[in-house]
Image (cartoon, rainbow, N blue to C red):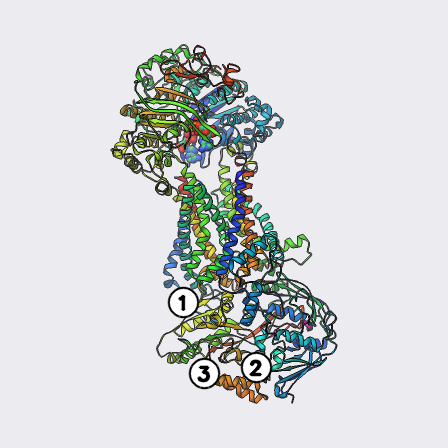
Amino acid sequence: MRFLLRRLVAVPLTLLGVSVLVFVTTELVPGDVARTILGREASAESVARLRSQLGLDAPLPERYADWLGGFLTGRWGESYTLGVPVRDLVLDRLAASMLLAALAFALLVPVAVGLGLVAGVNHDRPVDRLVSVSGLALGATPEFVTGVVLLVVFAVRLRWFPSSAQAPDGSSLLVRLGHLALPALSLVLLCTGYVARHVRAGAVVAIESAYAGAAELRGLTRWQVVRRHVLRNSTIPATSALGVQLQFLLGGLVTVELLFNHPGIGALLLSSAVDKDLPTLQATAMVLGLLYMVIVLAADVAYRLLDPRIRLGAAS
Amino acid sequence: MTGLRIENLSVAYAGKAAVRGVSFTVAPGQTYGLVGESGCGKTTVGRALGGQVARGGAITSGRIVVDGVDVLGLPPAGLRRWRAAALAVVHQEASASLDPTMRVGTQLAQALRARGRDRREVPELLERVRLPDPRAIARRYPHQLSGGQQQRVVIAAALAARPRLLVLDEPTTGLDATVEREILELIGELRVELAAAVVLISHDLDLVGRLCDRVGVLYAGRLVEEGPAGAVLREPAHPYPAALLAGTPRLGRTRRTHPLTPIPGHPPVPGEELAGCSFAPRCPRADALCHATAPAPSAVAVAVAVAGVPVPPVASGVAALHQASCHHPDQARRPEPRPQPPQRQPAETEPAETEPTETGPAVPESGPLLEIRGLTRRYGRTVAVDGADLVIRRGEVVGLVGESGSGKTTLARAVAGLAGRGPGTITLHGRPLHPSVTRRDPGQRRAVQMVFQNPYASLNPSHTVRVILAKAARSLGGTREPADLAREAGLDAYILDARPDRLSGGQRQRAAIARAFAGEPDLVVCDEPVSALDVSVQAGVLRLLDDRQRAGGTSYLFISHDLAVVGYLADRIAVMYQGRIVEQGPAGQVLHGPHHPYTALLVGSRRPGPPGRVSATGCPFAGTCPSRVGGLCDTSAPPARDLGQGHVVRCHLDPDRLPRRAGNSTSP
Amino acid sequence: MTAIALPFTRRHRHRTALGIGAGIVLAWAVVAVLWPQLVPYEPDLQDPAARFLPPGGAHWLGTDQFGRDTFSRLLAGARPVLLVAPAATVLAVVAGTLVGLAAGTYGGLLDEIVMRVLDAVVVFPSIIATVLVVALAGRSVTVMVLVIAASFVPIVARSVRAATLVEREKSYVEAARLRGERSWGLTVREILPNVAPTVLVEATSRFGDAIFAAATLSFLGLGQPPGSPDWGASVSDNRLWLQLAPWTVLGPALAIASLVVGIALVADALRGRWEAS
Amino acid sequence: GAGGGAPLTGADSGAPQAGTGASAAASVPPRRGGTLRAGSPPPPTAVDPVTMYDGSAIAIVQLVADYLIWLDRDFTLKPRLAEKWESEDGGKRWAFTLRKGVTFSDGTPLDAEIVKASFDRLLDPKSKSAALSAFDTVLAKGGVSVRDAATVVFTLERTFSDFPYLVSAGNYNAVILKKDYAGDFTKKPIGTGPFLLESYDASSGATFTRNPKYWEPGKPYLDGVKITFYADDQADLLALQSGEIDAQILSRPQLVGPLKGLGDITVDQVQGTGLTAFTLRTDRPPFDRKEARQAVAYALDRPGVNATVYDGIGALGNDHLFAPLFPAAPDGIAQRAKDPAKVAELLGGQPLKFTLTYDPPSKDYALTVQNQLKQAGIQVELDQRTSADFYGGDQEKDTPWLFSTANLVGWAGRATPSQFIIPMVKGGGVWNGSKYANPDVDAAADAYDAAQTPEERATQAEIIAKALHEDVPLIVSVWSGTVRAYNGRKFTGIQAHPSSYVDFSSVSQVV
Ligand SMILES: Nc1ncnc2c1ncn2[C@@H]1O[C@H](COP(=O)(O)OP(=O)(O)OP(=O)(O)O)[C@@H](O)[C@H]1O
Ligand SMILES: Nc1ncnc2c1ncn2[C@@H]1O[C@H](COP(=O)(O)OP(=O)(O)OP(=O)(O)O)[C@@H](O)[C@H]1O
Ligand SMILES: [Mg+2]
Ligand SMILES: [Mg+2]
Ligand code: NI
């Protein structure tokens, strides 16, 4: 697996590049984290004092080297603004995001694959159009709109689900999942169309393929043909689409995190970028970057594993 | 009654008739061949036999009765049960009819389970289609098998059905000659054993003649002629099969002795309604009657079935009937006797045509144009071409044959300067050619041109034919206008302003040939230029290549896996095996022998031995060679033996022990 | 922001889909040009006495927290949307195509480097980039266009590169090389016209994405200048009042959805046609 | 001698009154127990009483720690850790007598030394506290002394009649903390307040339990408080509506206004002294001309701003810094109203066009101003910056909020008008964004602070107000009101506060 090796080597290099980029770009953003911490009413002297306390008056390369050294040895520092250890903060937020992403993904896969299959098998019939167009329309509706609608209906009116994604401490897994249900649902609504379209495309190819026709001529029912042949052949090409969605679910959730009060990594990324909280920002960017690359790689590997043609090389 | 009976079957796609009123019967144990040009409805009939039509299609009329069961009248569940119990279909492309993501064994197991049988029979099934090491094969995925092996697996799945009706749709198309023969042998054996009604679909008249009892010729969705295979393929009553036969190259017939006559025009597309006979626009003998009224099927005088043709096993009186839908059935027969189909005929009946002496004087002796010495090309660790030596003389057509993967394309691309770098030299007019085309000087670029296999990819789809030809003419220093080039290639002027996607395969290949001749080349490399084409179109393109060669005295390096095609065009033939040229010499001598044991295999005079081990130092063919000399062949490289007239064979065997094309080994 | 790519559909007539899609897009395009003639109120006009009016006779789609007419704003919002999305799309497609063609043509080290750089761009959080650019250059349409375009370049480049690699293997390319064409010229003259369908399909898909991306940027307060009737901005400005005055949100949200669906239908149908030919 | 006016001195009012809910509580004894779940935005920075400035952090600290004096919702001062206070030496020295028997949650008894330490911490020139600016020119390091264990004395730099406000909750950093407080409030949360901080998580929230050692007997009634952080206003509101929280710490009038009386939700409302200052730079065109400034002031439709931006709960402003709530607010100045004719006259046919700089919280205000001025023929270009950008930069040279031509700055309510006047409009004031300098105003501001009688103060106030109204260095169109929404079916005693402060010691479950 030379490809895997080459890609793995690229990961730290890309991350290094990203960290430099983050450092340099944040430096260019106007604003001052010391001022943010102390508020606008604090005196200029206090702010200057805090700056030097935080080491912000050192030259950029020196600060970068310091940060890099610390980061690599596991000392991720303290958040400038929140004053808590960055590592705990980032990893906690990441864990929260991952839980939500995992739930959303777990719902997304069967729903999107199911709808994609239904659409593909019945392609160019009304069901297909319904799935395709509604998937597109939902995908085009910002998640904060669907989110609020879900909240108003299910949390405020019906009170079936809590409005906040955060369960009280020590809740059982079931309760926690209940809290995550609405945000996960709004994400599923957002992403289903995209994945379903990919599955559908695969399903159309598969259902019209000679092997599906052959299976039917062997006396299998439609359903058997779909289950045995179409399902796998249509989901394999959709793995990269699923990877893209997983990436999005992990880092692109700022709006959902805000709306459902789910302190996740997306919101942390935004707030630390706005506040110029560099240690937090850097760590968040690195962790997310790593995760992104792992996901893309995993999607590629999954594709290779699932598709025997690639897994086992070209024809012998 | 038992067997298959089709009555008045019609199928339409989006309301346009693709198959019209087809009726025939097949008795159990009998094989019925369906032949015709591409698009005439063969596959559509084949699928309809299982009650299946492609999306957008519908069976508009007709009955299909198998062993008394009216298939089309079955309710969906009943149809499924019937399919499971009585039907087996082997599709056109084996690789497409196997699920790429599922192990072969699993797929067979499913086929078995559908018939209520045990999955433990899988190895047995694989063994019956003569696949080595069935257990290992069962664990593989389709792409891990060769085309021939895949086709066997599909046949195995069909066997699992113990069908009453077996439909074989082009079971050997796309397979190379040796594999094709193995598959055909297998089918021949199983046919008897199964005692099912078999429908064999093919455009290959030879093959149908060899395997079938009766033949139906489809044209534009109609059965234009039907009758015993021997009669139809030797003495066709309808001008269409006669024309098909006239356009098919056969081993032992060269362009100098038997020029092919392609059928002009092209078949009507579905929905194109003609008042009279649908073949009339292309028929040389059509008269007003033909254009005005459609002919009805009528019996052909049985007297035509000349002595010597064994009467096929007759299941019913109808089977012997020979019918044709033609107003002038007798005129289709040529005055001279048709060559006998190879079916169950000893090859010795046509010795005059395979006499090498007949082709001798046609080859002009001239100096070398291109010399290849010790050419080696690798892809990673694969050695695609391994120290090949080849000489092409001025004005000479050199045919290059060999099984798939033997390195033909790589050699051709090396000559054209597209195969990257590697050891060995190529000289043109005595001057070395740079391995990379971009480093060759304009004169050399002009001198060597290429016609590619896939007509669909070889023309830039975004340019019109005129632009393509003009660009070629300009950069190759040609003097002729696109219009002239097109006319020389037999293309109508209107085509010049069309983009390639509007052209048929044959027209594209003609355009590609016109492009190759834009700069008056000395050598044109043709890599399987006709293998993607239909029989009748192939004949036209072969004629064109022949014309262009004669007109300009251009040399060809002509590649094909089809020996008949190579034999038709080539003056000299080189045979490649695993990257090495194992034999080269005058076409007739190479084909007729004495020749290399591998060539013998290709021309069908020998059965392959069991595959064995090959050492790096010995003869690459040693593993499979039926006449292997133990020890010697395995360990030392074979010497080049000159048999005279430039006929060189690389083999340890004594020249007089080399095999000859003695007889036809494909016995029933 | 999600990418809404439209996978292949095969050889079917898509004329109705094309008609509906093109109809939607054209209708919005007309609105974008002619809205000053069509609106019953000036879109920015505030009326403190008419806040949060439900849809009715005077205000067809009601009013928002400033007492502005939602319907007028909906019509006026078509213009910024139809400026940002096409501009961002064109930029992304041009840049992505050049990068993808170069990577696909020259291959080797260049390809490797380009692909890794694109990886880094994808991995680099776009929020940071947005915050940065907005902070440096202020909120403006140009900034928004640039940010969205930049985030799309890798996507376009990847698919163009893939298409180039496929085309490069076809024998017409070799035929051109036999004529003496060299790499870049060959790419531009022979390959580019044939990856054009990919480019165009990318363009249509990216166009849908761009609308969505603009809406998301607006939600984060990073998009259009304040007060713009841009749909994305309207949705994000008004979503706080979704419960109280749903008409302020649903109008622009449906408009976005309709435009994206329209574009998708067109893209889909065009792809279907290429497939068919 | 001791000041006579109510604002000047304070005394223990004795009976434990519980605000508006008290009337009900008077007949039925408040029920004990229960946990109040409240929502609030996450504090943007670490919660440190010394440096905090945002509402959430202040609320968290106020639940746990206490002030010498509480600033009540009607701007009266309520004794807390100080039982009484009086001025000496003509208002230059102030003595505070501490309540007896108060202990910190770790058992340390409160004494004058601790109070002194708390203020010394804020007065240290190295302090990072914003209180340092509040004490500027009034109280300097070394000005706090211990007279006896129960008396703290503040010796001022100048006479300041409103000084008790500066050591009250009105100066929110002035909480009394232990001597050894080292900046880690959320880790060692020790105070004298009604609740104990049990847990704190910067991302999710904080939990509090009753402080058994709280000095006021019987209080608090609640067993505990749980604050959940909502980074999004809508999420906060939806949580309230869905019953997931019982109250909001910081409610937005525009959002909760429409919910008044819907379902279980009760909205308490109070006048405030907060404002959005629409500052015009008087030293630079176009606003170096008084007429231009006045034109803008006359172009505004103030009731319209109140309706649109404050949901109608604010009080109209008259372009000076005396909120109606301040006792010294002059009433002799005519309310300025929209007057297009006057605008035209003032502009004299010249076009007026300017750029308005602001940060996101002022967005609605900016849009409203822009549209209103447009209707009066004045063209406004909006320049929205991120908060970091707007308040960032060099405070002496270029920070946008102090140096742009025109800008909007939101000010939370202050306890005394001086807290606005001195920094904002006095010549050279630290937050004088208009660069306004009027010797009369400067003198009157000093005289106001030094004034010993309400009458004298009113006189000075009128001078200042008239000058500001006339010169318009900044436009005050509306004085904000504040609201607090809560579940009235479940809890009583929750009140809105002009500065959104929290005092949950009197909150109890509905019986
Ligand atoms: N699914 C379909 N939809 C519409 N037309 C079709 C479809 N399948 C086949 N046809 C048309 O029906 C006619 C018969 O096609 P069919 O595949 O049966 O021909 P064939 O004889 O098998 O050709 P070939 O030798 O190329 O396999 C052709 O003109 C073809 O274009
Ligand atoms: N691009 C390539 N990369 C790697 N291996 C290749 C490549 N092209 C050809 N080969 C290998 O080189 C060998 C010779 O291939 P080549 O295409 O020259 O054979 P061929 O005789 O033309 O076969 P066919 O009849 O199938 O066209 C084969 O083993 C093939 O697998
Ligand atoms: Mg066919
Ligand atoms: Mg080849
Ligand atoms: Ni379709």
Q: Specify the quadrant that holds the N terminus of chain A.
A: top right
Residue receiving disc 3: D470
Frontmost of labels 1 and 3 is: 3
Our reading of the magenta stretch's main secondary structure is loop
Which secondary structure, mark 1? loop
| Residue range (magenta) | D497-508
Q: Chain of mark 2?
A: D
Q: Splitting the image into 4 quarters, where does residue B77 fall?
A: top right
Q: Is residue D315 visible?
A: yes
Q: Is residue B307 left or right of residue B50?
A: left
Eyeballing the image, is C236 above or below A123? Answer: below
Report whether mark 3 lies on the same chain as mark 2.
yes
Crowding around mark 1 (Cα neighbors within 10 Å: few <14, some 14 to 19, many 20+) is: few
Residue receiving disc 1: C42
Crowding around mark 2 (Cα neighbors within 10 Å: few <14, some 14 to 19, many 20+) is: some
Q: Chain of mark 1?
A: C
Eyeballing the image, is B223 above or below A129? Answer: above
The residue nearer to you, when weighing D290 against B380, is B380
Residue type, label 2: Phe
Residue at 56% over, 87% down: D457
Eyeballing the image, is D370 above or below D422? Answer: above
Residue at 32% over, 35% down: C179
Q: Are marks 1 and 3 in contact (CB under 8 Å)?
A: no
Residue receiving disc 2: D326
Residue D323: x and y in percent read 54, 80
Residue type, label 3: Glu
Q: Is residue C176 left or right of residue B632?
A: left
Quote the CA–CA distance across marks 1 and 2.
41 Å
Q: Splitting the image into 4 quarters, where does residue B285 fall?
A: top left
Quote the CA–CA distance across marks 1 and 3.
34 Å
